[in-house]
Image: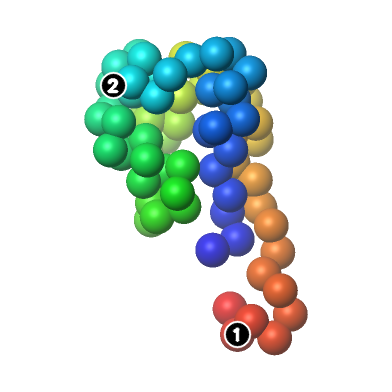
Amino acid sequence: MAIVVDLDVQLARRRMSVGEFAEAVGITPANIAVLKNGRAKAVRFTTLDAICRTLGCQPGDVLRWVPDEEGDGG
């Protein structure tokens, strides 16, 4: 998938644990892991809002697009 979730970077910058972050956002640590590992198929805007509010960041600080390699078949 071409969308990369940079939660680890943001959590490290804020010295925040996954458990602490999950509680503040209102989702389980297991769902944080799904996001971090790139296995999520969707993110609700309410969840993205809570993530950005908790981290004090913009959506682009958490999500970024990386083009697939050519010949990948997409």
Q: Is residue 36 above or below residue 40?
A: above
Type of the residue with mark 2: Gly
Where is residue 2? Give x, y as percent: 60, 61
Which of the marked residues, 1 or 2, is nearer the chain's N terminus? 2
Number of on-image labels: 2
C-alpha distance separating marks 1 and 2: 37 Å
Residue named by callout 1: 73
Residue named by callout 2: 26
- Relative placement, left or right, of 58 versus 46 is right
- Relative placement, left or right, of 39 versus 63 is left
- Relative placement, left or right, of 28 versus 74 is left
Q: Nearer the viewer, residue 12 or 56?
A: 12
Q: Residue at x 64, y 81 (%)?
A: 72
Q: Residues within 10 Å of mark 2 (few under 14, many from 20)?
A: few
Residue 54 can be seen, yes or no? yes
Q: Is residue 14 above or below residue 63?
A: above
